Image (cartoon, grey):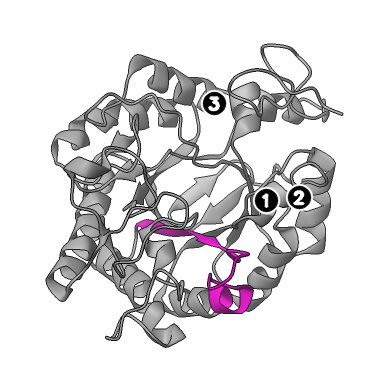
Amino acid sequence: MKSLFDNINLKNLNLKNRFVRSATWEKLADDNGFMTDKLLNIYDRVSKGGVGLIITSYAYISETEKPNKGMLGIYSDTFISHYKKLTDLVHKNGSKIILQIVYGGSQTKYNTSDRLIWGMSSVPHKKTGVIPKEMNQSEINLLKKYFADASVRAKKAGFDGVQIHGAHGYLLSQSLSTYYNQRKDLYGGSLENRSRLITEVYSEVRKNVGDDYHVSIKINCSDFEEYGTDFEQSVYLLQKLDKLGIDSVEVSGGKKLSQLKEHMESVYAWYAGEIAKKIKAPVILVGLNRSYATMDKILNTTDIDLFSMARPFLAEPELINRWGNGDLSNSKCISCGKCYGENENGCIMVK
């Protein structure tokens, strides 16, 4: 029988358990994307709390493309020495850490009038209304270079890997959508073509960091919306990435999370379980993982390997140590002692 506290090897990552702190936007980096003491303290507390792997909040890869305020950056070599303090701290505390990297695209309301925003096609974003510039081939090549250069910096800074953000409506996620991607060239039309940007970004990253470095991707199992990526398309892409050598896949999703939030936990477990049957790369499940018992059951009835959480670690950084000591009750907010800490403006009582 498998245990959530099994040691597990993911290529170059030797993890002490199957728990992952998934990326969450803390909004605490400075205006240039550098760590602040408050942000460093969050990672210090979580890594001391016993989690096996930390995935940082997303870091922007081009100085001129910052989709949200308070984001981490990785757009220049200046960040290499800067992040050594973070990676050394997390390693000292016994955890591993990988950097999530992203190009935001039109899913943004931040400073949109003063910067050039690339997209697959010049169509208005459904929520923000932002109309990006359709990338030409030279800009696509530059985008791939941004991802590759960011990954090399992460490796030099001591991160144990990188995670390419291909989910949640950002540019790479949009490349699969027939609404956001209406191109007529090699990057649009067929599913093979719409998958091309992501597979080329991965290949460029891999070429630059080498075969011995961990490269992960976060992907939607489905966008759960018209003209968005559906489950079969997601599986197709992941099977292509699997053949190319992707080291791990974190399975998330689109709107269905908010639709199901009050009714269940581990909302993408079925999708992630089916994906795990179809690829060799380890699968990480994210999306309202809350109770130890539920995750333990999923672990032993599916091929899912690891479990990501974000808000429970904000609510209770010591959660994994507590579970390891035998108290398997759900996470407790450090403020009120009762909730999951799911509302940044106050506590939500567990029903």
Quarter of the image that includes the C terminus = top right
Measure how far apart labels 1 and 3 are at the Cα level. 24 Å
Picture residue at 37% right of the left edge, 46% below the top: 108
- First in sequence: mark 3 vs mark 2: 3
| Residues at marks 1 and 2 touching, judged by CB atoms closer than 8 Å | yes
In magenta, the rendered stretch is 213-235
Amino acid carrying label 3: it is: Val
* Residue 162 visible to the viewer: yes
What percent of the width, then of the height, locates residue 97? Answer: 43, 40
Vertical order, 36 against 133 (above or below): above
Q: Residue furthest right?
A: 351
Residue that carries the numbered disc 1 in the rendered image: 257
Within 10 angstroms of label 3, few (less than 14), some, or many (20 or more) residues? many
Residue that carries the numbered disc 3 in the rendered image: 46
Amino acid carrying label 2: it is: Leu
* Residue 303 visible to the viewer: no
Picture residue at 30% right of the left edge, 25% below the top: 85
Q: Residue furthest top?
A: 335
- The answer to whether 317 appears left or right of 69 in the picture is right
Q: Nearer the viewer, residue 107 or 249?
A: 107
Vertical order, 225 against 322 (above or below): below
Residue that carries the numbered disc 2 in the rendered image: 260
Q: Secondary structure at mark 3?
A: helix
- The answer to whether 269 appears left or right of 42 in the picture is right
- Magenta region includes residue 211: no
- Magenta region includes residue 230: yes
Picture residue at 34% right of the left edge, 32% below the top: 69
| Residues at marks 3 and 2 touching, judged by CB atoms closer than 8 Å | no
